[in-house]
Amino acid sequence: MILVKKVNVGALLLILSHCALQGQTLQQDSIIAESALRSTIKLYDLAMGENSHLYNGREFINPFERKEANGHIYYITDEWQDGFIYYAGQLYEHVSLRFDVFQNKVIVEHPRSHREIELDSKKISSFGLNGLKFVRLISPTEGFYAEIYKGEVKVYIWHYKTLKENTEGKTMVREFPAKEKVYILKDETYHLVSTQSAILSVFKERKSELKKLIKEERLSFKANKEYTLSRMARYYDQLNADK
């Protein structure tokens, strides 16, 4: 547990502003006021960041950190990524994030100590990194899903990794192959799809129109999965809205 010193932010702002402006001449007032404001905002952000309960979680332990492994347990990269997160109803931007897709956990980096902190998943409504927004769902499996499209119908991708162990000589080597499951939420039911034809089956009421769209725009589930999913779902909603 990281111990964080509490700060009375309101009092801090008043003291800093008063000290910065005290004793200055009238001619310097506008310049000093602007400088004081910038300094106050900077210290306010620092105080809020370090004292935020975003950084009050338990330290994250990578179960494979000291073991021989090829690859890693994180989404896309094991490097810290700049992202945003809605945590306990509060938006935090420019946060260093990692998404452990092996255990489905979100990790943040403390801005000063650089410790890895595991967040309480139930307090996370959504987060964003690598250009994608992830949302927490209870079904079909509780966890975080990439939100590909949100309309009358919704499309989600469950990114995950599994453990594969191989013996090389006398050494056990672990690999973490990346996998995914695509779900379309339609009529309050989650449909698992893995092919373009499966998508058309879910949207069977508009199958002929969607086939035409696929041909005209040369859509390919294999070549560009996320775009094809969002384009087909959006067009399906559009057709139903126009009827």
Image (spheres, helix red, strand yellow):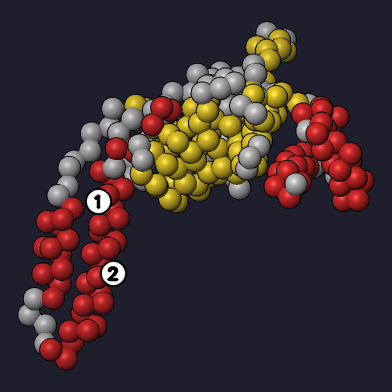
Counting from the top left corner in percent of width and height, residue 129 is at 55, 44
**From what the image shows, is residue 102 above or below residue 41?**
above
Q: Amino acid type of disc 2?
A: Arg
Q: Is residue 227 visible?
A: no
Counting from the top left corner in percent of width and height, residue 197 is at 86, 29
Counting from the top left corner in percent of width and height, residue 119 is at 40, 31
Residue extending farthest to the left is 23
Q: Amino acid type of disc 1?
A: Ala
Q: Which mark is residue 205?
A: none
Q: Residue at x 16, y 91 (%)?
A: 27
Q: Earlier in the sequence, mark 1 or mark 2?
A: 2
Alpha-carbon neighbours of circle 2 within 10 Å: few (<14), some, or many (≥20)? Answer: few
Nearest the viewer among 112 and 187 is 187
Residue extending farthest to the bottom is 27
Query: Which structural element holds mark 2?
Result: helix
Q: Is residue 183 visible?
A: yes
Residue extending farthest to the front is 243
Report which quarter residue 163 is drawn in: top right
Nearest the viewer among 172 and 176 is 176
Q: Which mark is residue 38?
A: 2
Q: Residue at x 53, y 35 (%)?
A: 135
Report which quarter residue 85 is drawn in: top left
Query: Which structural element holds mark 1?
Result: helix
In the rendered image, which quarter contains the N terminus? top left
CA separation, marks 1 and 2?
Answer: 14 Å
Counting from the top left corner in percent of width and height, residue 88 is at 35, 37
For disc 1, the marked residue is: 47
Q: Residue at x 42, y 42 (%)?
A: 86
**From what the image shows, is residue 102 above or below residue 196?**
above
| Lateral position of residue 145 relative to residue 55, left or right | right
